[in-house]
Amino acid sequence: MNNKLLIASAGAGKTTLLVKKALTCSNSVLITTFTEENEREIRKKFAKLNNGVIPHNVTIPILKTNPLQLLCYKGYCCFKTTF
């Protein structure tokens, strides 16, 4: 599995890149965010680039609790870590 982590500054084009990659991927895609506003921005970008359609293989959860919740998101992360 080729999991990717994208970290970049504000305005660098993260959302555009993520949506474009998601539109070309046939595997399950997890795009996470921590705010409802960012989730709306992701959906707006799909609307702009894909006629408002979010593909069935794309999941966009809002992580409202511990960011470590991401490590346990079913079916997306396959790695071990120690803290």
Image (spheres, grey):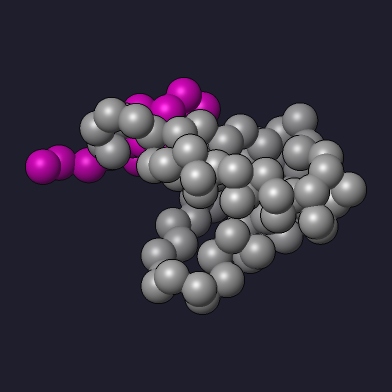
Q: Residue 21, percent across and down? A: 69, 58
**42 and 7: which is toward the camera:** 42
Q: Give the range drawn in magenta.
A: 70-83
Q: Residue 70, percent across and down? A: 36, 36
Q: Does the magenta stretch include residue 80?
A: yes
Residue beneath the point at 79% across and 48% down: 47
* Residue 30 placement: quadrant: top right
* Residue at the limit of the structure toward the top, as seen here: 74
Q: In this rendering, is residue 63 above or below 22?
A: above
Quadrant showing the C terminus: top left
* Residue 66 placement: quadrant: top left
* Residue at the limit of the structure toward the left, as seen here: 83
Q: In this rendering, is residue 71 above or below 6?
A: above
Q: Residue 78, percent across and down? A: 42, 37
Q: Is residue 48 magenta?
A: no
**39 and 61: which is toward the camera:** 39
Q: Residue 18, percent across and down? A: 61, 57
Q: Is residue 37 in view?
A: yes
Quadrant showing the N terminus: top right
Residue beneath the point at 51% across and 48% down: 38
Residue beneath the point at 45% across and 34% down: 62
Q: Is residue 29 left or right of residue 67?
A: right
Q: In this view, does 10 lie to the left or right of 13?
A: left
Overall secondary structure of the magenta section: loop
Q: In this rendering, is residue 55 above or below 1?
A: above
